[in-house]
Image (cartoon, rainbow, N blue to C red):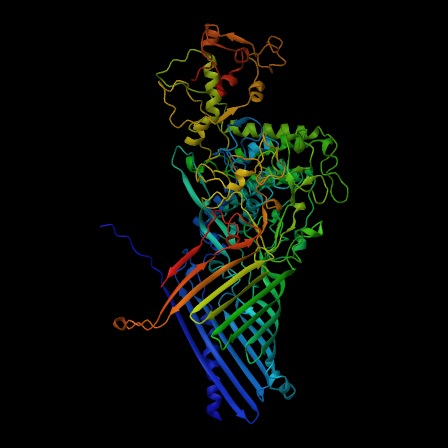
Amino acid sequence: MNFVPGERDQAAILYAESQFSYNRIMGDHNVSAMLVGTIRDNVQTPESYTLLNTLPFRNVSVSGNTTYSFKEKYYAQFTFGYNASERFDENYRWGFFPSFGVAWTVDKEKFMEGLKPAISKFRLRATYGWLGNDNVSTSENRFFYQSIVNLNNPTRGYSFGLPTNIVEGYPGVSITRYANPNVQWEISRQTNFGIDLGFFNGALTFTGDYYQQYRYNIVQQRAGVTASAGFQAPILANVGKYKSKGFDAELTYNKNFASGLWIQSRGTFTYATGEFVHFDEPTYAYSYLSRVGLNSNQTRGYIAERLFIDDAEVANSPQQQFGGEAVMGGDIKYVDVNKDGVVNGDDMVAIGHPTVPEITYGFGPSIGFKSFDLSFFFSGNARTSLFIRPYNTSGNLYGTAPFGNRFSPNAVLQAWADSYWSEENQDVYAQYPRLSQTATANNTQTSTFWMRDASFIRLKQAELGYNIKGITVRRFNVKSVRIYMSGTNLFRIGAFKLWDPEMGAMDLPIHYNVCSILV
Amino acid sequence: MKKILYILMMPLLLTAGSCKKFLDVVPDNTPVIDQAFSLRVMGQRFLATCYNRLPANNALGNENFLMADEFWLNSTANFGSAAYPGWYISMGQQNANAPLLNWWGNAGSGAYWQAINDCNVMIERVQEIPDMDVAEKNMWAAEAKVLKAYYHYLLVRAYGPIIIRDKNLSVYGDQTAMQEPRVPVDDCFAYIVKTIDEAMADLMPIEQNGNLDVGRITQIAAKAIKARILVDAASPLFNGNSDMVSLTSDSGTPLFNQTYSEAKWVVAAAACKEAVDIAVGSGKRLNVWTPPANLTVGSQSTRFQMDYRTAFNESDGNAEALWYDTRSIAAAAFQAAFTPRGFNTNTVSNGNITSFMGATLNMAEKFYSKNGVPIEEDKTYPYASRFDLVTVPATDEYRFNLQANYTTVRFHLDREHRFYGTLSFDGGVIL
């Protein structure tokens, strides 16, 4: 009786809320207020069982909001949250986060009367406020005011006595985290401006939002700790600062024509970018090594010039110091950015666009005429780079390396088979450097050699349908039947052709094209 | 009015009431470092932690092997640089950007700074343990001191001038306090020797509980360590090393003392004599192998070879060992790597023997000739024709070490006992 117990996943959530709200209309003035108190306790099965993982997550908050509007034209709002979380030391547990908002419905103004129905809706809005974030670590690293000490660590122990005789073995003591009572809420301060426009009685609408966000007190590892202090764990503190900005826009067009033609279409556009204002790091000799001013998803790496043509060129070029096997002909040649005669960590620069796209967009109409309907939707990314992983050392996947390794063999990508450096074909601009049995430290460095432009536009969804009218099968109570054909991810236009760039640095290329005909 | 006030109060009461207790989720007895010093049993674990980062000699990838070009491995595919960095150092791949065997950093092998931190905590806090007597507490503190000095020594040996970490830095202290200069090499050695001297009196003179104390620092071990350190300090690498004249501190003083001092040799010799005296006085002597009762050993050469081999390999009854590395076991995988494979698998199966390692010719040439001098200096040794082929004569002089009437290189004949006791080679006899 092969009994295999099922997964035991349990969660218990206790949530209590009390709410007090007030509404009053006094002529043209409309006032409302609300006060909410909540308590929340969440206990759940953790992924790994340690004492700290099984402790509950608890939040207490008092929040409230008051709104005021005048003549339904002018709006003002004030919101606050006074939140507490179990993760911080009691001196820093509570955080106060207010925000303010105003809005102006311009189309209700007298001077806008003449512009209707051309401009049927025009609304401006702005908000400014603070938010706190207590999710500054994984669930097992939550309590920074506590140290994490393992008093029974077998890898840190020692045994006394000759191994051939009876041995006295002791486990050791190790520290995974030092106590820091000063860790507190991460705070973000955000400003948002928005505009809603409607034209021709809502046939054409536009919504736009522009935001600026400044995050500070970001929990980060201190960089100034010397190795000679012998600390066993990284030291963390609220020192990071990051600012970001972006805008979202949406445009829709809906129209029903008398002839039976109807159109509904929609387009969206998002742009987001950010940079570090402060990042705890040592004072570098070269300014380009600093993370300040870079996006949090910005990759840093080496600039690859081309491949070495042969061993003699390796001997006559700046030494590339990565340890591991000796550099040979066919390995990637990097640029010595600071011209100090060696290629090392001081030559790493920001390369490519952020790995999370800065721009995403989409558009597509649905069109119908009499019984037919056709809809399609394009979506795309721009301003993003992806880094091909030549060898994946985590798990058992061996990246895109030809044949993998003896533990997890791979097939060979056509792109690599067509273009690689070899003694017979010393192509310095080949797509793949010299072949080797194992990953070489030199060729697996993050560099522009493996960087690709991951921007693309794809036909995400297309559907063509026909509504058969007049068919009724009384027996089954069928009143109408529609036949349609739909496809997903039908084609893609973009610079990167090896696999779907939305997969990122995936090791196993996956393509999916679904085409179905359904009734 | 009152009713409104009460209603207003409700959400606040709900939350403000016993908030503090509600939000204090961590139970009271979670492990903190203080508990390591609350009982003798826990204190022993911390003492073991201090010993833990001594270089372990039980695997090829560890920090003591392969750097000196003494062995070579069969392929970089089998032995990558992450697991066997020593070999890549001997291949010339050491670099400042991604150092192999990065003992200064905290990751990977030899995190000696962390070990020094542990020893400092031990020294500061061992007196807090309630159920121990003062003499034993002092002994543990003394062992931690000698270990601390030893770890500093291992760093000096690799990096030259280092930072002396006599007291731990505070974890959340000012980071500018962490920017310390390197200390000149002479001062490093002076500090190391001073620390060992301070600890000497409190150590146990010899293992007191028989096998249970093997591996602990005794006075015999401490004096031997001190003698070794002083010999290194007097050696040309650290004594008047003019090659390192350009390594200076920020103020311009050279960190390697440029003046050769003979006094260092005098001090080293005195320390060696002291170490020998205390060892001999406790019954230690050069190892002599006793053949088992049912074996007749004809050749004196065989006895010398076995004396030499058992001095390194035998742990039971080894009179020569002053301080044991209790983790140094040549396990199966290790032995399989350096045992030669048989050629005729029809008669002898190779089983798991991989034979991935070989001693280098460089090392084989360092052994002396049978006259006890280096082969390039021995007037009677045919140095120029040492790689010519000869046939081994079937005489008693040769037949215990080489196969009689076998053709091999001249290089293998007429060598010292340590050569035959250490290496296996073409035409050799495996004892």
Note whether B169 is above or below B426 in the view shown: below
In this view, the residue farthest toward the left is: A1
Q: Which residue is at 42% across, 63% downward?
A: A55
Q: Residue A218's spot in the image, x, y percent?
A: 59, 62
Based on the displayed image, in which of its 4 quarters is residue B88 positioned?
top right
In this view, the residue farthest toward the right is: B252
Q: Is residue B320 left or right of residue A218?
A: left
Based on the displayed image, in which of its 4 quarters is residue B173 positioned?
bottom right
Note whether B341 is above or below B38 in the view shown: above
Q: Which residue is at 59% across, 32% downward?
A: A425
| Label tally | 0
In this view, the residue farthest toward the front is: A259
Q: Is residue B310 left or right of residue A304?
A: left
Q: Nearer the viewer, residue A67 or A21?
A: A67
**Residue B145 in view (yes/no):** yes
Q: Is residue B291 left or right of residue B390?
A: left
Q: Nearer the viewer, residue B146 or A384?
A: A384
Q: Residue B189's spot in the image, x, y percent?
A: 65, 37
Q: Residue A77's spot in the image, x, y percent?
A: 58, 81
Based on the displayed image, in which of its 4 quarters is residue A309 positioned?
top right
Q: Residue B278's spot in the image, x, y percent?
A: 54, 30
Image quarter where the C terminus of chain B lies is top left
**Residue A439 in view (yes/no):** no
Q: Nearer the viewer, residue A238 or A30?
A: A30
